[in-house]
Amino acid sequence: MVGVHREAEHSLPNEALKLLRCLASGWDDVVDQKELRIVRLKGAMTNEVYKCGWQTEKGASTRKVLVRIYGEGVDAFFDRHDEIRTFECMSKHGQGPRLLGRFPEGRVEEFIHARTLSASDLRDPEISALVAAKLREFHDLEMPGPRNVLLWDRLRNWLKAAIKVCSAAEAVEFELGKIEMEISTLEKELFRDNDNIGFCHNDLQYGNIMMDEETKTVTIIDYEYAGFNPVAYDIANHFCEMAADYHTETPHILDFEKYPGLEQRKRFVHVYLSSSGDETSEFVVEQLLNDVEKYTLASHLTWGLWGIISEHVNEIDFDYMEYARQRLKQYWLKKPSILGC
């Protein structure tokens, strides 16, 4: 039996421990492959994530990897095989961590020696500019497969899943009977044939962004929800995530007073557009800003439905239902001023 930290011993499946032991046996600098320290990382809401490390011969340093245990019921949200293919393709592009191995319930990834951003980092102008430029690079990646927008099908599929798993009382509370019409309205009002479509992350919260403090290199991680979408939706989703802090005593509580103000949004969009080296006019900036604001509505619907489903399929300690309540409340609150209806 691999010697592990007592709290984590019952958290990792045996297949994961065997894989970790096998990986450690191939590294000459590991002092004792059986002496493994495991620390669960906070903030993950789809998977359970662990930092695993062994002491090396240098004494002070450790050899580290990341273990991801797949969350329950994720089939309702995405195809795990597609996510693995995306992960491997991103790695070939030099984006994100390398895949080190798989086991039935999850995988082992390269540990990136950079810090995960905090909620407050997203409001730091310098860091926000780095994220904006990196997001533009992400959107411009050449990824395999058709460039079909997934947003509208995803919303409809998640609505069906939410109706299937929730109670009659919950369906009434969240007005799920109205959501199909809302999705159709958004698609009609927001989507245009000439929209800028890119490979989007679709879940760009601060916990999915890492930064090397020395080089100021930003890395975007975790691609479960990634796929082709209007880039305005991805930016909108990132802005909405500024209302969240998943490392508090109440990680499910959102503060929409922290949604970025106009000047902050404008700076982000300007850096995003100009980071490719192209000249950026005020008109183009304003147009994208306007599109982004409209797509915040799609973000609220997406994660509202996600919360309802997650409450019934995921055992991670997070108040998914209250999170869904806040996102859908924000949708109904903001729709009149954004769409004028």
Image (cartoon, rainbow, N blue to C red):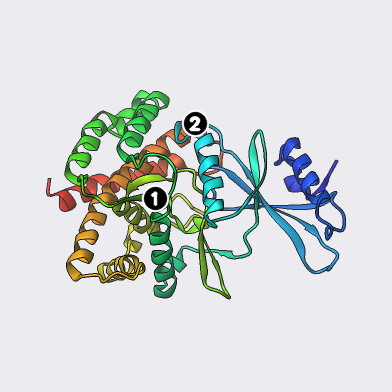
137 sits left or right of 40 in the view: left
Q: Is mark 1 on a helix, strand or loop?
A: strand
C-alpha span from label 2 to label 1: 20 Å
120 sits left or right of 197 in the view: right
The answer to whether one can see residue 254 in this image is yes
- The quarter of the rendered structure image containing the C terminus is top left
Instruction: Classify 273 as above or below 151.
Output: below
Q: Nearer the viewer, residue 48 or 284?
A: 284
Q: Which is closer to the viewer, label 2 or label 1?
A: 1
Instruction: Classify 255 as above or below 317.
Output: below
**Callout 2, which amino acid?**
Asp
Q: Where is residue 299 in the image (x, y as percent from the top left)?
A: 33, 47
Q: Nearer the viewer, residue 275 or 318?
A: 275
Q: Earlier in the sequence, mark 2 or mark 1?
A: 2
Q: Which of 133 and 54 is in front in this view?
A: 133
Q: Which of 285 and 309 is in front in this view?
A: 285
Q: Where is residue 280 in the image (x, y as percent from the top left)?
A: 25, 70
Residue drawn at 50 percent across, 64 percent down: 118
Say few, some or many: other residues with alpha carbon within 10 Å of mark 1 (under 14 / 14 to 19 / 20 or more): many
45 sits left or right of 282 in the view: right
Marking on residue 200: 1
Residue drawn at 38 percent across, 43 percent down: 303
The answer to whether one can see residue 43 in this image is no
Residue drawn at 34 percent across, 65 percent down: 272
Quadrant of the rendered image containing residue 189: top left
Q: Is mark 2 on a helix, strand or loop?
A: helix
Instruction: Classify 183 as above or below 263.
Output: above
Tally the marks. 2
Quadrant of the rendered image containing residue 30: bottom right
- The quarter of the rendered structure image containing the N terminus is top right
Read off the residue under disc 2: 75
**Callout 1, which amino acid?**
Cys
